[in-house]
């Protein structure tokens, strides 16, 4: 089936492929395990998976992708389910092939470098890393199995880790099958590609992923954020007004993602029983807001280095805003609170 796709590619024609298979499986009620997303649906909801493929073919897809993205070699290894990966992928390819039977449609095996997902979030855990040899062996096992299942090509999806992506893609190429590679750029990569373009956030999203750095004015406090930064919330409460001189524009990071790399000047002021404010005792810069029992730290957006790629989400405690400025930007203005009281 791949020969006709190759012919079209060579003549510069457009090839229509399927869409978000996993998302579609979820939409149709396929089981979504918190740990493996749609991987197990190949076994538990085979009819749903096959229907998704069939509908894409009916809609004109010339190439469909077996539901093997979430059976990531790294993820299943971390879960101690190496053997399951093999059997689930066999089932997934069989379903895609059954849907494609009697149609001029090629079947791709999807390969990802997805890592364990932090429960209840869409973030992947960076706790676990694999040495090169081990990772290459895991990727080889995955793609060799897909090749044995006779997929027409291998689809490297969302390749973004510069090490794992290369090792996985080299393992794929070694099978001798055609390999398509989809690259996902992270924020710092996009910044490298387009310096100063301010385009390193997803359009309309306004959150920022990838490593960011920040500091106080004098450098006696420095930090790194390894993960997603929330959109900016402007707090106009009296405390933020007093501390900043105007209002507090703050993004936020999960505590596990925030690393203080210089704390020489860092001091914490308990502004109430429920929150502390981190600032630099050398230069006076306000930096952090930490609520008791919360798993995130608010970070003053102004302390981030370089363009933040963030957008303002909205304004809170507008009833105590200063009367000498206008409240602008964002999609909401709240008199007081956000999520059971952001500030104090
Ligand atoms: Zn300082
Ligand atoms: Zn406030």
Image: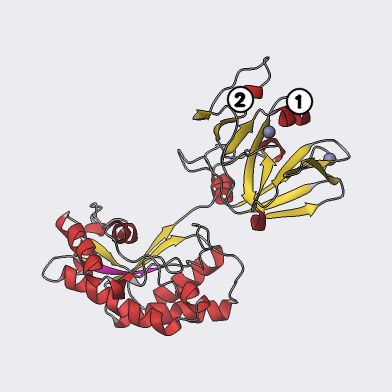
| Quadrant holding the N terminus | bottom left
Depicted 137 relative to depicted 343: above or below = below
| Magenta-colored span | 107-111
x, y (%) of residue 275?
73, 44
Q: Is residue 303 left or right of residue 149?
A: right
Depicted 324 relative to depicted 222: above or below = above
Q: Residue at x 73, y 43 (%)?
A: 288
Q: How far apart are the two marked residues, 2 and 1, measured between alpha carbons?
A: 15 Å
Q: Of marks 2 and 1, which one's residue comes earlier in the chain?
A: 1
Give the quadrant of residue 217.
Answer: top right
Q: Is residue 339 magenta?
A: no
Which element carries disc 1, helix, strand or loop? loop
x, y (%) of residue 169?
44, 70
Depicted 270 relative to depicted 143: above or below = above
Crowding around mark 2 (Cα neighbors within 10 Å: few <14, some 14 to 19, many 20+) is: some
Q: Is residue 282 left or right of residue 5?
A: right
x, y (%) of residue 298?
67, 43
Compare residues 244 and 322 and report the one nearer the observer.
Answer: 322
Q: Residue at x 61, y 18 (%)?
A: 326
**What residue sits right under mark 2 in the picture?**
318
Compare residues 168 and 333 and report the one nearer the observer.
Answer: 333
Q: Is residue 106 left or right of residue 80?
A: left
**What residue sits right under mark 1 in the picture?**
245
Mark 1 residue's CB less than 8 Å from ligand 2: no
């Amino acid at each position: 089936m791949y020969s006709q796709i190759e012919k079209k590619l060579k003549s510069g024609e457009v090839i229509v492929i399927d869409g978000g298979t996993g998302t579609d499986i979820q939409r149709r009620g396929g089981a979504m395990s918190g740990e493996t997303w749609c991987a197990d649906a190949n076994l538990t909801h085979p009819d749903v998976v096959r229907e998704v493929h069939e509908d894409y073919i009916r809609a004109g897809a010339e190439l469909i992708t077996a539901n093997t993205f979430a059976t990531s070699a790294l993820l299943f290894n971390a879960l101690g389910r190496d053997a399951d990966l093999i059997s689930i992928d066999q089932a997934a390819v069989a379903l895609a092939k059954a849907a494609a039977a009697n149609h001029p449609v090629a079947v791709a095996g999807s390969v990802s470098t997805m890592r364990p997902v932090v429960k209840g979030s869409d973030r992947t855990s960076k706790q676990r890393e694999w040495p090169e040899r081990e990772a290459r062996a895991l990727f080889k096992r995955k793609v060799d199995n897909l090749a044995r299942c006779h997929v027409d090509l291998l689809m490297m999806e969302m390749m973004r880790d510069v090490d794992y992506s290369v090792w996985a893609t080299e393992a794929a190429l070694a099978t001798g099958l055609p390999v398509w590679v989809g690259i996902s750029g992270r924020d710092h990569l996009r910044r490298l590609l387009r310096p100063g373009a301010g385009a390193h956030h997803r359009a309309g999203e306004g959150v920022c992923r990838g490593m960011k750095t920040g500091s106080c004015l004098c450098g006696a406090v420095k930090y790194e954020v390894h993960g997603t930064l929330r959109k900016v919330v402007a707090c106009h409460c009296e405390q933020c007004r007093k501390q900043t001189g105007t209002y507090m524009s703050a993004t936020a990071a999960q505590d596990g993602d925030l690393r203080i790399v210089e704390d020489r000047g860092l001091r914490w002021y308990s502004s109430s029983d429920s929150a502390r404010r981190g600032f630099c005792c050398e230069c006076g810069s306000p930096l952090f807001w930490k609520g008791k029992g919360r798993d995130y730290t608010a970070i003053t957006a102004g302390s981030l280095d370089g363009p933040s790629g963030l957008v303002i989400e909205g304004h809170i405690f507008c009833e105590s805003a200063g009367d000498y400025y206008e409240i602008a930007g964002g999609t909401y203005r709240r008199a007081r609170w956000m999520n059971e009281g952001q500030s104090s």
